[in-house]
Amino acid sequence: MKTRGISILGSTGSIGRNTLRVVESLGDEFLVVALGAGRNVELLAEQCARYQPELVSVGTEECAELLRVELKRIDAAPPRVTIGEAGLVEVATHEGAGCVVSAAVGAVGLVPTLRAVEAGRRVALANKESLVIAGELMTRAAERSGAEILPVDSEHNALHQCLRGERREEVRRLVLTASGGPFRTGTREEMERASVEEAMRHPTWQMGAKITIDSATLMNKGLEVIEAQWLFGFGADEIEIVVHPESVVHSMIELIDGSVIAQLGATDMRHAIQYALTYPERRTSALAPLDLARLGALHFEPPDPERFPCIALAYRAMRAGGTAPAALNAANETAVAAFLDRRIRLTDIPRVIARVLDAHAARGVTDLDTVIAADAEARQHAGEVIAELSSAKEPARSLPKATHAD
Amino acid sequence: MKTRGISILGSTGSIGRNTLRVVESLGDEFLVVALGAGRNVELLAEQCARYQPELVSVGTEECAELLRVELKRIDAAPPRVTIGEAGLVEVATHEGAGCVVSAAVGAVGLVPTLRAVEAGRRVALANKESLVIAGELMTRAAERSGAEILPVDSEHNALHQCLRGERREEVRRLVLTASGGPFRTGTREEMERASVEEAMRHPTWQMGAKITIDSATLMNKGLEVIEAQWLFGFGADEIEIVVHPESVVHSMIELIDGSVIAQLGATDMRHAIQYALTYPERRTSALAPLDLARLGALHFEPPDPERFPCIALAYRAMRAGGTAPAALNAANETAVAAFLDRRIRLTDIPRVIARVLDAHAARGVTDLDTVIAADAEARQHAGEVIAELSSAKEPARSLPKATHAD
């Protein structure tokens, strides 16, 4: 077996750390050649000591300095250190890396991921924002360079597995499953009052803060619908969402003859990561297999459009096309950050997005600049809406605070 | 689209009738060239009038005569009429039929199915007995002739669909789902007392009498495990059974990386029949698609070896190999017939099979004669055990009778 070089964008995040565990479990198959991180210099230094990449990138010059100090402290050989977006692009296009795991969170992953695709790398994609924002550019670049985009999201990874033996024209629709998040059985009022801590209590998956809030509003599923559009070439009317609280069925496809193919598995991201790395082959995994008889029951229900308006907003942006999904994503990122800062309510997130979409005139996506301009514009508008909403609420002092009582 | 000729063994049974509905729904794609039936002459005559096959076969000369009379009565053009096993073989090897649907019930389907395989036909196989009895001969014949065997059983059809995009060496195990039958939640005592009517009340599938009783004892699942061995090349330790009362997940495969691929669908045999006819292509079906959100929940539990000893008997015969599965099948067919005749109890069925297997010295399967001899021997022994059990019970007059009270 030939050893393959691998780069990881976002190595200190949840997907990044799990990728390194998968790489270790696969023995000599992969060699870590480059790591990109943001500000978690301490963990990055540990990763450098353990995996000895040739190249790393961090967010700022200050982080780079801290990394050098930390590497000296733990007596680790220093790799070449780069910074900022240019640094991430270097990591993403390192010539020793045939495979790039794109797991930086949010829009910061966009340019490096696009460069990896343009360079013809296999891209194991966890950064769904890059497809949501610039799916058209990404898809076109992959067609030109021959890059394979393998999704690491459990849902899209499941769809990729379900679609393996099938022809596109014989697939009627994709069905994305959603856990329903912590407010699946909650009321509209409970969601209005929800604290950051309550919104962070995801029932089945352990993930980062941004994606966990997206799971609470179901915007995560909305973004995934847009992602699925670009990954697999299906339209808004061909992609559905079903709520499945156990998160065991990771997603499904329905064929034109009525047959449904589903992929099931344990809720451990390492399954999807390993699949994306080793595809088209599969490797033996020591992770515990699924035991359906022990689980007992799997439940399914339609998503509630009243309590989860983010889904309809995502479909709306998808149908509008062009820069609309980029505006949706930018507004959502800005609003989620404001919620995590306790400046707005959880239920303000869709309000912010709706206002931004109302004002956004979608333009065709011809180049990255168009997308970046739409992103910046939407962020600014979202910021204004957030300022308005949070100042309107200030006098009442009713914003939910952290609490130990549940 | 080129019209393809099709023959049906067992055209008046449940699978046969559904096959004809599928053929009709597919327009000009298939042309019915030959039909084989047993004694249901009236329905066969109707089928002749509607589909105008060139050739039909019936059980006996008497049936042939009745068929001619019936055809005249309804003013239908008479096809060529053949009788008995030789007649079924003619139907199975009709040169105008590229595809043969093997749906005769029980061991009677064995020789005609084998001849169709030897003749290199696509065989859409619903007659599981032919693989259970003579899987080795059938598999070898298919290798030689290049015949494709496409399973019509919903479980094996599901496995075939799940395996489409996968490599054999990357599949860890097959998981067959079982509805659990009418006694899934019953007690051992209720099974001892069960009437034929109670045993015939299958919760999810409408099927013939023999297979419905097999579903009540779970022998159906045991036979399917043996069938799966031959269809897909998996051993006894690589095939498992999970009880799934809704029968929505038709079966699953587990890959070496821990991923599970499942096929789901409505409980309508026409899905599997159509798949077997049109494979590797799929055709649009007007049947209602699966609606998981409406179903709400799917349940899974391990099968209970105490109440369903037929499963262990099937694994035992499979591990013994050679003629043991033929003996198992013969003993089961004989015992099921005796139960339907109200000569023995439902729970006597596994007792009869165990006694026959205890006495059976498994021989290697080199030719059809060996299999047929083992079948005959097991039937005779089963008959003796049944006579013993039923005479022992005669004085008590405790055998369950048909009843309108439930």
Image: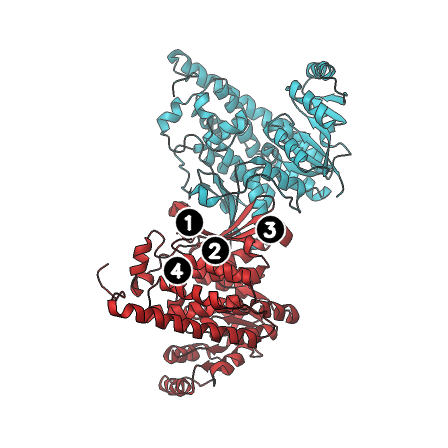
Chain colours: A red, B cyan
Residue holding disc 4: A217
Check the residue under mark 1 and report the chain it is in: A
Rate crowding at label 2 as few (under 14), some (14 to 19) or many (20 or more) other CA atoms within 10 Å. many
What residue is shown at x 64% (from left), y 72% (from top)? A145
Residue holding disc 2: B258
Q: Amino acid at mark 1?
A: Asp
SS class of the residue under badge 1?
loop
Check the residue under mark 3 and report the chain it is in: A
Residue holding disc 1: A291
SS class of the residue under badge 4?
helix
Number of marks in picture: 4
**Marks 2 & 4 on one chain:** no
Q: CA distance from mark 3 to mark 1?
A: 28 Å
Residue A393 lies, in percent from the top left, at 29, 68
| Quadrant of the rendering where the C terminus of chain B is positioned | top left
Q: Amino acid at mark 4?
A: Thr
**Marks 4 & 3 on one chain:** yes
Q: Amino acid at mark 3?
A: Val
Q: Is residue B293 left or right of residue B263?
A: left
Residue holding disc 3: A171
